[in-house]
């Protein structure tokens, strides 16, 4: 019985080897070494720092956003102006986002000249930081 199994198994193994389906690993081979080498050869992904709003600006812009959703444009502008009229204590990104929201309000009201001024200020303050 052992000889008959060998007669069946050997041709199958020979076909697998010829197709590259059965290749024995080299002595001492470990998948970890290949994985480590593979990671070293991969180019490192560049990461980009993403700005975030300060907590103070976030609360005021959240209030402005809620007013905007209710289409209460005067309340939206008032909330945004709380930031823009007192810029000390705010990051450039905070101010840029306030200008963006104010520009959006003006464009929604079809006050395009005012909207353009706000968007220009947005780009002047934080153009390189705005995604």
Image (tube, rainbow, N blue to C red):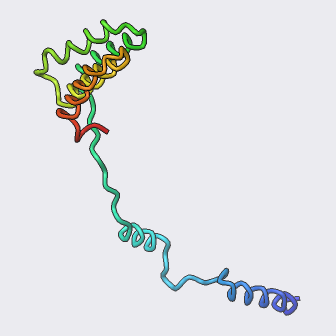
Percent of width and height locating residue 116: 26, 26
Q: Position of residue 100 (x, y in %)?
A: 28, 25
- Residue sitting at 27 percent across and 44 percent down? 49
Give the number of marks: 0
Residue appearing at x 25%, y 15% in the figure: 80
Does 125 sit left or right of 36 as displayed?
left
**Residue 5 point in image, percent of width and height:** 84, 87
59 sits left or right of 91 in the view: right
* Residue 123 vertical placement versus 43 (above, below): above
Asked whether, in this view, residue 58 is left or right of residue 23, the answer is left
**Dividing the image into 4 quarters, which one contains the C terminus?**
top left
Tell me what residue is drawn at x 22 percent, y 30 percent.
120
Q: In which quarter of the image is residue 85?
A: top left
Q: Quadrant of residue 125?
A: top left
> What quarter of the picture does the N terminus occupy?
bottom right
Coordinates of residue 108 in the picture (x, y in percent): 38, 17
- Residue pictured at 19% horizontal, 17% vertical: 83
Nearest to the observer: residue 53 or residue 25: 53
């Amino acid at each position: 019985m052992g000889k008959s199994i060998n007669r069946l198994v050997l041709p199958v193994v020979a076909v697998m080897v010829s197709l590259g389906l059965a290749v024995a690993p080299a002595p001492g081979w470990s998948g970890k070494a290949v994985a480590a080498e593979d990671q070293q050869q991969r180019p490192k992904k560049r990461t980009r720092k993403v700005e975030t709003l300060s907590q103070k600006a976030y609360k005021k812009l959240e209030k402005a956003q809620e007013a905007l959703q209710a289409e209460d444009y005067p309340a939206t502008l008032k909330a945004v102006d709380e930031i823009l009229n007192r810029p000390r204590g705010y990051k450039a990104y905070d101010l840029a986002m306030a200008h963006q929201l104010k520009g959006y309000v003006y464009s929604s009201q079809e006050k395009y000249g005012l909207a353009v001024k706000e968007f220009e200020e947005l780009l002047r303050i934080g153009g390189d930081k705005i995604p």
